[in-house]
Image (tube, helix red, strand yellow):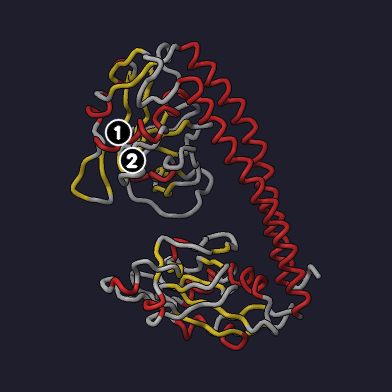
Amino acid sequence: MWEKVKLGDVAEIITGSTPRKKNKEYWEGGDIPFITPAQLSDDTVKYVNDSDDYITEKGLEKARLLPKNAIMVCCIGSLGKLGIAERKLVTNQQINSVVFDEDKVYYKYGAYALTRMKPVMELRASSTTVNIINKTRFSKIEIPMPPIEIQQKIADALDKAQELIDKRKEQIEKLDEFVESVFLDMFGDPATNPNEWQVEKMNYFINDIRAGWSIGGESRQKKENEIGVLKISSVTTGKFLKDEYKVVDKEKIKKDLVHPLKGDVLFSRANTRELVAATCIVDDDYTDLFLPDKLWKIILDREIINSYYFVYLLRNERYRHRLTRKATGSSGSMLNISQKKLLNTKFPIAPLELQNKFAQIVEATEEKRKILEESLAEMENNFNSIMQKAFKGELF
């Protein structure tokens, strides 16, 4: 096991600040990236070189310029989000940046070491409604410090493992792009319906909408014989995420439940403007999970509409905009679409034979995705194994 050192003993810790937004001299026409936690990463070592906001040289008088290779760590709110400065830039006050003494700590090794510190940060954070770890407490966090040549070897090994992971993720993303391009080639833009397919309201082919039921639960992993209520996030990505649930006490369940079963189409009737109307297809039977009231199971007439055609059409950005415009509510953070509005929405119906052909392409692509995702899981396990061994002094 390597000797441990406090961050404050091997690095300068710099807390960011925000120049006054009302002062245009600080912001307009600026070219110095102003970094917030939104630009940092939760689970990887990410290089950062741009932002949504930039400050001017005048604004820099009210901030602290960070050098290239500074490690930026979120210490207010989303604790532990991290990024490496790829160029000189500044951050807001939620971020503490670590500028390592390069004679003692190789910056990339330091970044990997800090990705492991999120649990430590959470333990040391002030117990308020927003997690905060101040500069003093952050400076006292300890990381293992092997000889610098070993640090470089560890960072190189982790870089190579991460590169394989990134390439595999890119391959998976390309599968999504492929299916979307196939959809447009076969059916055209559904918002304009260039093939002049028959157009009907959705009540023409939706046989039933089954709403779920909500109850409070615990955010933890289910044990055997326990049951979970799905969260809206189980649908928002467009892929069914079976681990997005809360554990519910069975004795408190007083209603018939709607379970997600293989082939079911799920629809999010409530969420933010950007995420409402998300849909997905369930990949297996999950009788130990049930839908909340904000998710619907949509029962389609399969002699008119194929599930894959329905879901991918609703994913189309321009068509989905029609649905999100129908969402209403007093809360800007949570809007709703009523069943009536959904059922009255017009929908282009392509020939069923063509829909089914598209579904076959999607299913074949999903098989490839499954293989790639299994490979990705192995790569991530390998990365974690290297990380564990490296910081225990067992790798080199």
Percent across and percent down for residue 62 are 37, 81
User: Would you place residue 199 above or below residue 340 in this image?
Assistant: above
The residue type indicated by label 2 comes to Val
Q: Which image quarter is the C terminus in?
A: bottom right
The residue type indicated by label 1 comes to Leu
Q: Residue furthest left?
A: 330
Q: Which image quarter is the N terminus in?
A: bottom right
Residue 136 - label: none
Distance from disc 1 to disc 2, alpha carbons, whole Å, reads 8 Å
Q: Residue at x 41, y 78 (%)?
A: 60
Q: Residue at x 64, y 51 (%)?
A: 166
Mark 1 or mark 2: name the one nearer the start of the chain.
Answer: 2
Pick whichever, 67 or 157, lies toward us: 67
Q: Are there few (<14), some (14-19), or many (20+) residues within 10 Å of tag 1?
A: some
Q: Determine whether, in the image, residue 224 is placed left or right of residue 322.
A: right
Q: Residue at x 32, y 16 (%)?
A: 199
Residue 92 appears in the picture as rendered: yes
Q: Are there few (<14), some (14-19), or many (20+) residues within 10 Å of tag 2?
A: many
Choose mark 1 or mark 2, whichever is in front: 1
Q: How many marks?
A: 2
Q: Residue furthest right?
A: 396
User: Would you place residue 255 above or below residue 350 in this image?
Assistant: below
- Secondary structure at badge 1 equals helix
Q: Which residue is mark 1?
A: 323
Q: Which residue is mark 2?
A: 276
User: Would you place residue 379 above or below residue 185 in this image?
Assistant: below
User: Would you place residue 376 above or below residue 121 in this image?
Assistant: above
